[in-house]
Image: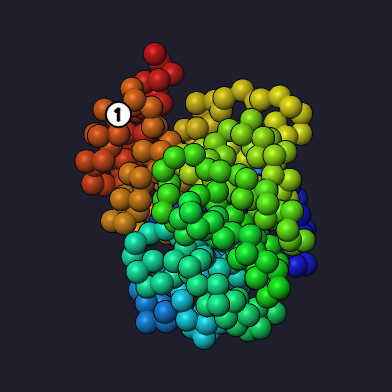
Amino acid sequence: MQIGPYRLKNQLIVAPMAGVTDQPFRNLCLRYGAALAVSEMLSSNPEVWDTDKSRLRMTHAGEDGIRSVQIAGADPELMANAAVVNVQQGAQIIDINMGCPAKKVNKKLAGSALLQDPVQVEAILRAVVAAVDVPVTLKIRTGWAPEHRNGVHIAQIAEDCGIASLAVHGRTRQCMYKGDAEYDTIKAIKKQISIPVVANGDILTPEKARFVLDYTGVDALMIGRGAQGRPWIFREIQHYLDTGNKLAPVEMDEKRQVMLEHLELLYKLYGDFKGIRFARKHVGWYLDQEHQRPFRAEFNRLETVEEQCSMVERYFDEFVAY
């Protein structure tokens, strides 16, 4: 798949997820075979750029792979300016968010709320594309509500405005993350436009990845929640796409190494206080089985880096011994 001058090595992309796809997570997914990892959503409002959260999201030092930065907002001028600033700071692709269903984003008429206003969609896309000399991509949902699926129309606007590729989550804003993703709208979008289309939503297994590719005819897949606690899902999917066979489950020694490295990177990026809290979330995803609930409950009460790392080590030591 080609995005502007960038040729992706395969069809697997890491979805941008607020509070999840920070640099440590992106780099782990890239190491395990993702071709592209899109950063967390960054507000186009410059008034919030001085916060610690925004500064970390706008930092690309040490970034592996192609640097794709997602921006969100409702004002064409602010969005264009945000794109320019991020390109100046190292972004190689600008991704526009018109898919986020969160209330705090939608109440500002940003994210998937924009799908209700195709005129504003066009104004934003034209402003951003004209403002930068790097590829601009777009992420949408299939529409605002099941009875208002206008994804095909939005996709045609995107192509007309010079968008380099389009990612589509197979739910409407009203659906949030409930129910099953539907791929008929994504299939229809792929048939109507010539730019690359990326399918997103409920791609949790290698078999599902194969099905979605075959059913929709899209150019690539975007993996979000399926990679939480499983950065190796990209390796598993690619192996299945290449061979038709499933890899053996990741071994415990490798899982231990990845988890401890991930924790170390979180502490380094966020500092001990915030790093400890981010670690709770990620460890909860790595160890998400019912029988691991007592471990998660105890881990979430720990307040120091040393305690967290020691408890993870002890968990795997006891597992091996058992």
Q: Which color mode does the image show?
A: rainbow
Residue with the most extreme top position:
322
On screen, 159 above or below 253? below
Frontmost residue, 139 versus 58: 139
Identified at 25% across, 34% down, the residue is 297
Quarter placement of the N terminus: bottom right
Instruction: Give the left or right position of residue 318, taking residue 151 as reference.
Output: left
On screen, 245 above or below 111? above
| Whole-percent x, y for residue 33 in the image | 66, 44
Residue with the most extreme front position:
147
- Residue where numbered disc 1 is placed: 293
The answer to whether one can see residue 31 in this image is no
Residue 94 lies in quadrant: bottom right
On screen, 247 above or below 142? above
Counting the numbered discs, the total is 1
| Whole-percent x, y for residue 283 in the image | 38, 39
Instruction: Give the left or right position of residue 87, taking residue 315 as reference.
Output: right
Frontmost residue, 42 versus 167: 167
Identified at 52% across, 43% down, the residue is 181
The answer to whether one can see residue 156 in this image is yes
Residue 213 lies in quadrant: top right
Amino acid residing under circle 1? Arg
Identified at 35% across, 45% down, the residue is 281
Frontmost residue, 224 versus 51: 224
| Whole-percent x, y for residue 142 in the image | 55, 55
Element class at badge 1: helix
Count residues near mark 1 (Cα–Cα under 10 Å), then give few for <14, some for 14-19, many for 20+: few
Identified at 39% across, 13% down, the residue is 322
| Whole-percent x, y for residue 240 in the image | 70, 31
Instruction: Give the left or right position of residue 108, taking residue 90 as reference.
Output: left
